[in-house]
Image (cartoon, coloured by chain):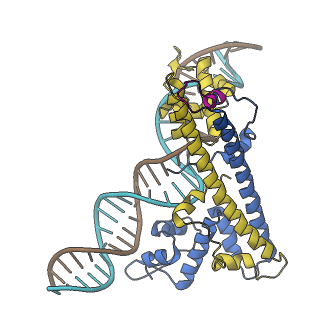
Chain colours: A blue, B yellow, C brown, D cyan
Amino acid sequence: MNIGQASKASGVSAKMIRYYEQTGLIPKADRKDSGYRDYSPSDVHMLRFIRRARDLGFSVAEINDLLSLWRDTSRQSADVKRIAQAHIAQLQERIENLEQMAATLSTLVDCCAGDDRPDCPILADLEEPSGEQEVPSPATAGTGRLRHRP
Amino acid sequence: MNIGQASKASGVSAKMIRYYEQTGLIPKADRKDSGYRDYSPSDVHMLRFIRRARDLGFSVAEINDLLSLWRDTSRQSADVKRIAQAHIAQLQERIENLEQMAATLSTLVDCCAGDDRPDCPILADLEEPSGEQEVPSPATAGTGRLRHRP
DNA sequence: GCTAACCTTTCCCATCGTTGGAAGGTCAAG
DNA sequence: CTTGACCTTCCAACGATGGGAAAGGTTAGC
């Protein structure tokens, strides 16, 4: 099975499959005489595992942990549960940060007349934060300051 | 005022101040004879504006828009309101994605005994997604697939 | 067998916001 | 004058992904 077919079958782009191999997340694929990478159905299986975990928001590092457990037939259910729970906590922390941001912005928007007047309460608040409805701490604020993808 | 003092006063790291200048988000700073950048209180004011907007989750591109409006004394309150509202919508979309992820994971965790048995429902679900409690679409899933900072 | 269309390979570059370091110049206190 | 804290520029890295070039492999139709 060529990389393109494995890609379609797994939902992971060919680029990313090579990247995952390069960074050691997945083992080096077999090669055909032509030099083409050759994938088995079980490779595709693993790729779909990765894809699904990415969709659930796991980082590649976390997926590495999950894959070790997945491959380890003597793994303990408790280990997986622990990883998943930690991830849920992470997700909820991020959700709270985002909700805090949205709440602050909503407050500002509600105060904003939205008319033609040049004095806008939103800008005023950005200049001088009012009710110290401040986003958490500078440290944890970084966690909430997410990348925006255009 | 040196860059270090401006940094402390604004909460923006010196590195980032230089970066913002380099990318044109803020104008080039005045220089002292020594070549050191020289900041005025109003520069610090602008930096704090930026810092606060970052904390509220605005991207640098969005901050650019806000800064233009901020500097433009004939700006319309409505413009700012529109940007803020769009941003709130963005935040809420991301929150929903994260909540969907957390819900799926919670379901899995609840099904997981967490004992020593090696058959873990979480891993099983990652292998073969069950109830199609699938995270949105591949396209929008990208929006939810956020960067993790270690 | 030839050609066109498509696939794969490796390699490099870009993104976004941020941090780190190296090599060297400046400043203020001792 | 020396020392240490600061500043300068430049270069690289992170994580996950996409884009593209140049070169070679595979396959279908003629």
From the viewer's perspective, tell me whether residue A22 is left or right of residue A68.
Answer: left
Nearest the camera: B10 or B13? B10
From the viewer's perspective, tell me whether residue B71 is left or right of residue A111.
Answer: left
Q: Can residue A24 be seen in this view?
A: yes
The boundaries of the magenta stretch are A114-125
Residue A83 drawn at (x, y percent) = 75, 66
Residue B79 drawn at (x, y percent) = 52, 34
Residue lying at 76% horizontally and 32% vertically, measured from the top left: A132
- Residue A82 appears in which quarter of the rendering? bottom right
From the viewer's perspective, tell me whether residue A96 is left or right of residue B89.
Answer: right
Residue B85 drawn at (x, y percent) = 58, 42
- Residue B17 appears in which quarter of the rendering? top right
Q: Is residue A119 magenta?
A: yes
Residue A81 drawn at (x, y percent) = 78, 71
Q: Is residue A1 magenta?
A: no
Q: Looking at the image, is B115 positioned above or below residue B135?
A: below
Q: Is residue B1 visible?
A: no
